[in-house]
Image (spheres, grey):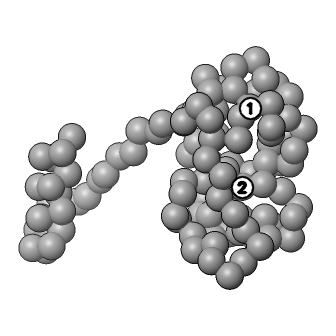
Amino acid sequence: MTPQDLIGLPLLTSAQSKQQDIFRSWAGSLIDRFNFIGQYNLIFNARPLAETGACLALTYENLINVTGTNLVFRPLTPTVTDQNNLIWNKNRQLSNVAQVFLNYLKEVQ
């Protein structure tokens, strides 16, 4: 999907991506022709609207299982990248699994 493909279509986007305005650099001046009809906090809340065909939901791939539904994931071109943040309570000891995961993330960044 290119920015031109989304012009005028009813779009839902996550509140975080709307706040960070990550689609503006991707779509350029075409963003003014996008029809953002709402925001969601969890893609699971936007899914029923997308399933009815009332809108398109912009989301990360594989956050929801679309197998056996009328939903389909289409990647954006050019690819949109987004910074993600991991937070945790510094005053709480992490489980062994959580600590291994955190160590892994620190290594691959």
Q: Is residue 82 above or below residue 45?
A: above
Q: Is residue 42 above or below residue 8?
A: below
**What type is the residue that disc 2 sits on?**
Ala
Alpha carbons under labels 2 and 1: distance apart: 14 Å
Mark 2, other Cα within 10 Å: few <14 / some 14–19 / many ≥20: many
Direction top: furthest residue: 29
Q: Is residue 21 left or right of residue 49?
A: left
Tag 2 residue: 57
Q: What residue is shown at x 62% (from left), y 77% (from top)? A: 67
Nearer to us in this view, 108 or 41: 108
Q: What residue is shown at x 62% (from left), y 64% (from top)? A: 43
Tag 1 residue: 3
**What type is the residue that disc 1 sits on?**
Pro
Looking at the rendered image, the disc whose residue lies closer to the viewer, 2 or 1, is 1
Task: Report if the CB atoms under discs 2 and 1 are less than 8 Å apart.
Answer: no
Q: Is residue 75 above or below residue 103?
A: above
The x, y position of residue 51, in whole percent, is 79, 71
